[in-house]
Amino acid sequence: MIPIPSELENVFRRSPELTRTYLVGGCVRDALIGIPHKDFDIEVFGVSYDQLVATLSRFGRTDLVGRSFGVVKLKIGEYIFDFTIPRRDSKVASGHKGFEIQFDENISPREAASRRDFTVNAIMYDPRTHELLDFFGGEADLRRRILRHTSDAFTEDPLRVLRGMQFASRFNLQPAPETIELCRSIKNSFHELAVERVREEWFKWAEKSATPSIGLHFLRDTEWLEHFPELQSILGVPQDPEWHPEGDVFIHTCHCCDAMATLPEWQSADPESRIVYMLAVLLHDVGKAVTTDHQLKEGRMRIVSPGHEHESVPLAEKFLERIGAPLAMRDRVYPLIANHMAHVQQVTDRAVRRLSKRLEPENIDGLCVLMSADALGRPPRPPQIPEMVGKLREKANELQVHQGAPKAILLGRHLIELGLTPGVEFGKILHAAYDAQLEGVFFDLKQAREWLAAQKQFELPAEAFRKLTSAQAIEDPESLK
């Protein structure tokens, strides 16, 4: 028996005209595997769209924005229920808009279910009899953790391949061989997909995956990885077996993504940060495709990838632009990738303060999450996070820069109080002052003023110099306000 909100049960109980009404899709799938759900999709047979609207309007506010797709959204309290009239879709042109839609309230539940993408999403549930309508073996596939397409109608929308990627990763589903083959047969239809739809599936993969590598292997096996050349290029790129016994860069990346999904910091993060961290680990080593070489080191040939962290950034830019990631999220991903080798450097106050600045708008906490996943993605090496990552985290906490770079001590208003006018020289002073602060030259406003008074490269007005060096200013830096 699938639990249903009392608000929805009330609709079913008081609507005799909705006798052929079934829960469908994700809410049924999730309930069968014990995942809590708040989104309910309901398919209604035997009534017209206008009749459905009239019935639902008695119970709450209806939203008809999905009218062209036969959807009525019913809002009751905290819930929004999606009611849908069954339809027949005929593909008449390329692209997700190239469908001719005909509503047919008399279509059979079996035919309606056959239009769904995967068998695990094609299971219906009768809320009155508490019976499953499972025409294509979806429940058995769910028990055996198999991802299988429902029918040949799958090929009408190529987005279903990317949906398969994220479903497989989220629910630990192994794609059926025939589904892989079918997806491979439509790989040339990728160009039909709107960027926004591609982004949505990648973001679901990045935010919700339990085992992200399954989806990446799915893309590889269906040959859809070709549409993401930055990932395709790391297939077969070798790594030094001493540090990476797990295999090539693609295999390492898959392990790192899986490790990310197990980290408490990732699991407890907000949705945007989960996406940022997962995309960062997905792309952190793509630069190895252009930097990997063999070099003689310590008397033997070694596989090396010098500077790969920096070369990974422009390749990550191409990938994230291709999937239409928002600029604000891209700006968080790039500095994480560029600095993911920071744990091999010495942890000093100066180095950590400067690192916190280089990471903006990200922070050291986020970088430690990425470096942890990177370190854990190297089986059969024992899972161990490098000691230097812990030291970096400790030092950042000590300096209070773990969540962002230090705030500037010497500000523009302080220069204005000295009689300086904003301009080019004004900006140079502030830039130099902040740089000195990061170096640890001063730690408070009094020391900042002393530093400024000692700088010969800036031609300060006599009155400004007098204010800086007066006894009152030295004892009380805020006295000039």
Image: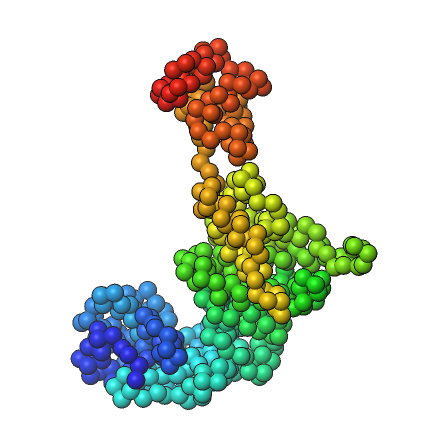
Q: Position of residue 336 (x, y in %)?
A: 55, 51
The quarter of the rendered structure image containing the N terminus is bottom left
Towards the viewer: 326 or 329: 329
- In the rendered image, is residue 162 in sight? no
Q: Height in image: 30 above or below 397?
A: below
Q: Position of residue 232 (x, y in %)?
A: 65, 65
Q: Is residue 270 left or right of residue 453?
A: left
Residue at x 44% of width, y 62% of height: 264
Q: Is residue 139 left or right of residue 346?
A: left
Q: Position of residue 325 (x, y in %)?
A: 50, 55
Residue at x 37% of width, y 22% of height: 478
Towards the viewer: 266 or 133: 266
Towards the viewer: 3 or 400: 400
Residue at x 35% of width, y 19% of height: 479
The quarter of the rendered structure image containing the C terminus is top left
Q: Residue furthest top?
A: 462
**Res 247 → quadrant:** bottom right
Q: Position of residue 296 (x, y in %)?
A: 80, 55
Looking at the picture, the colour scheme in use is rainbow
**Res 421 → quadrant:** top left
**Res 246 → quadrant:** bottom right
- In the rendered image, is residue 305 in sight? yes
Q: How many marks?
A: 0
Q: Height in image: 361 above or below 185?
A: above
Residue at x 32% of width, y 64% of height: 65
